[in-house]
Amino acid sequence: MRYIFKFPDIGEGLEEGKIVEWYVEKGQTISSGDPLVKMETDKVVTDIPSPKSGVIAQRFGGLGDIVKVGNALVEIEIEGVSGAEAVAEAATTPALASNQQVEEKGFGVVGTIEVAGDGAYLPASGEGMQAAAQPVQEQKRSKVLATPVARAMAKELGVDINQVTGSGPAGRVTRKDIEGYGRKKDYAAPVSTSPQPPATARIEIKPLSMIRRTIAKNMIRSKQNAAHMSVMDEVEVSALVEARKSLNQKLEATQDKLSFLPFVIKAVAQALKSHPSLNSEIDLEGDRMIYKHYYNIGIAVDTDDGLVAPVIRDADRKSLLQISRELKSISEKARDRKLTPDDFKDGTFSITSYGSIGGYFAVPVINYPQAAILGIGKIVEKPVVKDKQVVVGNVMPISMSVDHRIVDGGEVARFLNEVLDYLNNPLYLMLQMGGSQ
Amino acid sequence: MFDLKTLDKYKPIDNKMYQVMDDEGKVILKNWQQPMSDEDLVDAFKDLLFERTTDQMAVSYQRQGRMFTYPPNLGQEAIHIAAGKVIKNEDWFVPAFRELGAWLAKGVSLREIFLYFKGNEDGSRFEQANRMLPVSVPIASQLVHAAGIGFAMNYLKEEAASFAFVGDGGTSEGDFHEALNFAAVWNAPVVFVVQNNQFAISVPLKMQTRSINLAVKGVAYDVPSVVVDGNDFFAMYEVMAFAREFVLKEKRPFLIEARTYRRGAHTTSDDPTRYRTSEEEEMWAAKDPAKRLRNYLVEKKLWNPESEEELVKSFKKKIDSEFEAAEQHPEYRVDDVFDYMYEKLPDELARQKNMLKNYLSTVGGDK
């Protein structure tokens, strides 16, 4: 007989989770306790083990799908149990899953934590004291204080409780505030009856996506904490254009194709070695600097949902080809929303190639708490002076932001000169590549 | 053996930690003698494995939706097993919540533990555990109870100690300080055990206190205190045994800071990757208490690590059947929540009881 395993509330008052990875296939034999699926929830990313032994008869949902608590995850053909017995088991075993979910909210307050933000996007580097301290600060900001009845009302009325100013103790949102909120706003009277705004509405209100909220928080944190300073320059890259062209001819028969980005990543990783402050972090509270002897380069990837910055690890030790393949794989994963928190961890420096879409110079925002971010604009053909002659050159614009708390202008210029030298003359980069200085 | 002289050598103010074994299980003290028989030692290791297996199973049950929030013990077991070997039947056990192995040693059944974490009040009944208090959820509030119990033991002229557990975060609570002070002033035989696992949920110890360690907090109250390697079974056992004797003989409380690391999450609702690094986790994994005791036993040819798999398998069977028994336990009745405090239920409570019953009938019936 069949047993349906429903997605249980594995947190405290969870409503849904996202399928990250399936461990079982239809027809697979499993024992109780074996992992079925990896789920991402507001609280944790975790494996869900099977409560039963048997054979997987059916799986519900694909990667990235959102599953509500209490909805079916898998159907299991149970071994050695037949007929009515199994029905009875199915009816009793996952009792906590749906029926008691509401009761559970008041249960077990030892160490309930609310972490509304999603660390998966543009996270802080996992290094050192600062990183350990941040979640605590974020927690305070991430969730609006509100009475349970106010939360329930807000939900019912479709009011975004984060927009409501609380009048209760410590700014707690109360029932009155929710009632008052609808009256105060001049637009579309409280939102509840029609989820779609009428055609005449002048504005439309949509809840923030998790990723948008995370980006917003990270940007604010960076701008509030880092002392941003920017520098821009141009570099003539005709030799690089030629080098890339010739390498791509070599690769023609393969799946691989080099963009300019791997060259930039190698140039940056190499230059970081002689300019350690650009690969560091400041810990003002601890009165110390943290220098990193590894070179993990975060790459800004534009997706339909928003910006993410997965990391190329140990870029200094990888070949151009390895980096190129990794770039391909992380951008595909980013677009398919398959990146995991591990893909974002421990970046030490970031690169944004905004020019691949458009834009010449820019003022990038540092991926805090890193020391700097380098942006590359669109390569254009421009008149350049060579041997006192004006000729057509290929010019790559570079924009870089640094945290002036950590590093001063002189050092930034020296670093940038080294990067530009490498990009201007890829043979020079080859001369240095992989060396320690 | 840990004695008064050792206590004098490990002053908290010097920030020295009492250790018997190194990270690989090699004894580092000169002229040291094993404090228990080989047989008892093998039993202790089996208990440790049993705690660890139960703990892993409990997390799995929770993930299957068969149990509510659960706080894992992984990495802290040496403290629990040592306490379990020292705490006597007549002693009082005042738990925090993360002392699984010590609970089992005191006589709490697996079924009761599972019931508790399934949200059933019957799980706090502890039918076979003498003088075991239920979990007191407000952090550190239990310490005040323990101090009071110590006072009562003196008053009743009983030769019994009161063992109280708390985490590192709990030492920032007022109750911790009141309890230490009260116990010292009233000569109460209380052993306070601080399991310093480095994090109060996500708050690291360095954000918790400016003190050089947690044992030093006892000094101000004139409570003899010591820092112990909580992942070192022998060190923990010796200090626990010493502490019990000390509090009964000297009629004074004693404070132990057991330095350890919670290798799992704070609870099943917590994601530690958000606040700690894998480097740190690996560093502490190298100090794992099971590994150290196992190495010691293997070195002395008291243990065959190949036998472990079979043993764990048999543990799992037992644990599974206890869990299934807990699942068969009747649901806690709503009437039991309301009916015993007053002879006649006051109107307001009667209204609330009605409301709850009505609500429950809409989501699957009153139990």
Image: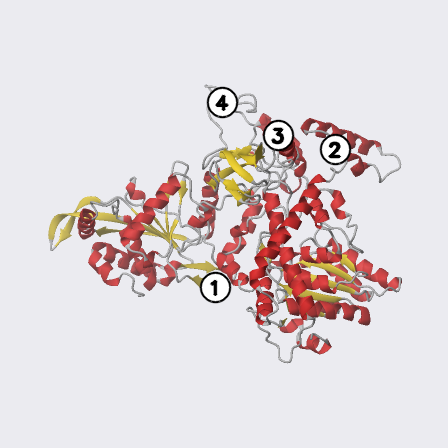
**Quadrant of res A317:** bottom left
Q: Sequence order check: which comes first, mark 4 or mark 1?
A: 4
Neighbor class of circle 3 (other Cα within 10 Å; few <14, some 14-19, many 20+) is: few
Q: Identify the disc placed on residue A288.
A: 1
Neighbor class of circle 1 (other Cα within 10 Å; few <14, some 14-19, many 20+) is: few
Left or right, A88 with respect to A162, comes to: right
Q: Are marks 3 and 1 in contact (CB under 8 Å)?
A: no
| Amino acid type assigned to the residue bearing label 4 in the image | Gln
Nearer the observer, disc 2 or disc 1? 2
Q: Residue at x 64, y 80 (%)?
A: B31
Image quadrant containing the N terminus of chain A: top right
Q: Are marks 4 and 1 in contact (CB under 8 Å)?
A: no
What chain letter is assigned to the residue under label 2? B
Q: Are marks 3 and 2 in contact (CB under 8 Å)?
A: no
Nearer the observer, disc 4 or disc 1? 4
Nearer the observer, disc 3 or disc 2? 3
Q: Residue furthest top?
A: A199
Q: Which residue is mark 3?
A: A83
Q: Provide residue B214's location: percent of width, then percent of height.
A: 65, 64
Q: Are marks 2 and 4 in contact (CB under 8 Å)?
A: no
Nearer the observer, disc 4 or disc 3? 3
Nearer the observer, disc 2 or disc 4? 2
Q: Provide residue A122's location: percent of width, then percent of height.
A: 43, 47
Dots 3 and 2 on the same chain: no
Looking at the rendered structure, the secondary structure element under dot 3 is: helix
